[in-house]
Structure formats: C-alpha cells, structure tokens
Image (cartoon, rainbow, N blue to C red):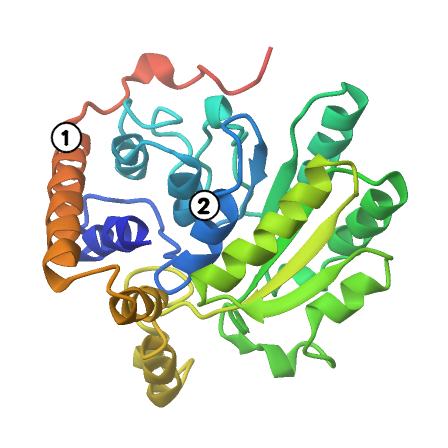
Amino acid sequence: MLYLRRFEEKIVEVYPRQDMKSPVHLYIGQEAVAVGCCAHLHRDDYLFTNHRSHGHCLAKGADPFSLYAEFYGRVDGCCRGKGGSMHPAFPELGIFGTSAIVGGGIPLATGAALAAKQAGQDRIAVCFFGDGAAEEGSLYESLGFASLKRLPVVYVCENNLYAVASPLGQRQPASSIAERARAHALPAQELDGNDVCAVYEAAAAAVTRAREGGGPSLLECRTYRWKGHVGPDCDSLRGCRDKAEIDRWIDRCPIKLVSTWLRQRQLLTEESFRHWQEEIDRQLDTALERARASSLPGPEELLQHVYST
C-alpha cells in the first residue's frame, strides 16, 4: 500500500510542472482494496479496471517506470504513450486495457471469465469499478449472466461515496450496492475498504469460490478518495466536498490503520517503516526521472497500433 501511495504522491509533486499532460485520476486513500484483492491473483488472471487504475495495475505487478512513461506520453510507456493515465494495458499481466467508460470494464471481465471457463483454463477475472458504475445497466446484466453461467469472476465495487462531485445519497435510493447484487443469486458482501485485512479475507473467499467453480461474487468496499475526481487537488478547494469530511477519512488512512495494527503486535517498528519508505522513494524517483527523460514518439508512430490485426 505504501508503494501505491508514494507512486501517486510523486505525481502530485511533479504535476504542477505541466510536462505530464495526461489527466490523472488518483487512487490515494483507496489502496487497501487493490492490495487486498490482487494479493490472491495469479500472474495470468484477468484484471479489468476503470479510469482510476494506477493502484490496480501496480498491485497486479505493473512496472512503475512503464506507467510513468505512459503518463508522460513517452515511447517507453506501456502503450507507447498513446493510452495515458486512463488506458494503460499490460497483457502479460492479464490487464488488457482499462476503460474510461463508466462500467465499461464490467462486461469485458464477464466475457473473459466465460472464455476462461469454456477453454478449461485455471484463470479467473476480477473487475474493479466505482459506485457510479453501479448505476449502469451493464453491471446488472453482467451479474445475472455470470450467476446463471457460474462464471469465475469477482466484481469489486470501490464505493468511495461520490461519482465525480455527486454524493451517493443524491444518486441512489438505497445505499447498499451489495444488497442489489444478491438479487442475482450470488454472494455479495459489504466491508470496510480501508481495512486491508478485511479486504484480504473477503477477497480470499471470493477468489477461491471462483477458482473452484463456485461462480461469481461481489465485494462492496466502502472507502474514500482523498483527492479530487481528476487531478492532484482536493475537491474542498472547489466546494464539492466538505473539508471536515475529507479530514475524517484521512484520519482513517488504510496505511495508518494497518501500520498501527502491526506496531501493536510488535511486527513493525518506526525504523523498518522508515527504511521501507526510503527504499520505495529511491525506486520511484529513479523510475520517474527515467520516464521523464524518455523519448517522445515520432510521427512514424501516428498510425501504428491504431487497429488490432
């Protein structure tokens, strides 16, 4: 989680230079969900995600240099600078492109799970999406189909309580997304998305169920993004969210919660935590500077990789 956090805090630091042109949807505050879920995945398991995908990609094993280079629009980026922050892809890790269309990755994950089942492969699909996507028909169509066909897929709703600037209570008549999922005859659980241990345990059960042929599950992880919908600023600066609300959630930082838990059990010291952060910063600083110094694509690349053949 610390790795994911520092990766994006580096973006916050350099973004004012205005040489990173890609819009960025930051994951800061939600790291426990990606880490708790992806800890159970095999390298070739499918992962489908959304516009807020940095944490998911890193938790699945993506190279930070390749991501940073992509955000800078460089040829060393995972999509050679054409995807930007919202469309990274790592096929070798089972990440076949992320979708900026709200709810767009949900039917793709369902289809990948169907393909894996028909091919007799030991692969599952995991799909991350937000509470805004829970208002899209693609979710309920996919849940019904996956349940009917007992597909090996885990749907993970990161309910951060806002769709852009619209709070959940102004958009949905019932607050529980898991309850709606249960109507499709599949197990659905609501949990504290800032508690990495709770996410880890719930994801373990869902992944095991999918891998053993038990069918799909849905996890609704209540969490909170610290930054604005897009960019490095906080929404409180634009009046979209109350600063006191943001501060309450920052006090429930997932890294703070788990580090406190570890210290109480004498499994973590201040010295070891500081050492980890220093090593992470060293790795990420090197990756960021390499990415910034990487070459821009030439005009000959304009029509390359536009269509799959």
Distance in Å between CA atoms under marks 1 and 2? 22 Å
Q: Earlier in the sequence, mark 1 or mark 2?
A: 2
Between label 1 and label 2, give the one nearer the viewer.
2
Residue 19, numbered label: none
Q: Out of 8 and 46, give the one closest to the viewer.
A: 46
Asked if residue 294 is positioned above or below residue 101 in the image, the reply reads above
Residue 149 falls left or right of residue 204: right
The quadrant in which the C terminus is found is top right
Tell me the crowding category of disc 2: few under 14, some 14 to 19, or many 20 or more residues within 10 angstroms, Cα based.
Answer: many
Residue closest to the far right: 148
Quadrant of residue 207 in the image? top right
Residue 100 place in picture, x, y as percent? 54, 47
Along the horizontal axis of the image, is 289 left or right of 139? left
Q: Residue sitting at 81 percent across and 55 percent down?
A: 186
Asked whether 237 or 252 is in front, the reply is 252
Q: Is the Cβ of the residue at disc 1 closer than 8 Å to that at disc 2?
A: no
Q: Residue at x 44, y 67 (%)?
A: 194
Circle 2 residue: 56
Q: Amino acid at mark 1?
A: Arg
On the question of residue 103 being in view, the answer is no
Q: Nearer the viewer, residue 159 or 117?
A: 117
User: Helix, strand or loop at disc 2?
Assistant: helix
Q: Quadrant of residue 183?
A: bottom right
Q: Is residue 120 above or below residue 109?
A: above
Q: Quadrant of the N terminus?
A: bottom left
Task: Identify the secondary structure beneath mark 1.
Answer: helix
Where does residue 291 sit, x and y in percent of width and height?
Answer: 19, 32
Residue that appears at 55% across and 29% down: 96
Q: Amino acid at mark 2?
A: His
User: To which residue does mark 1 refer?
Assistant: 290
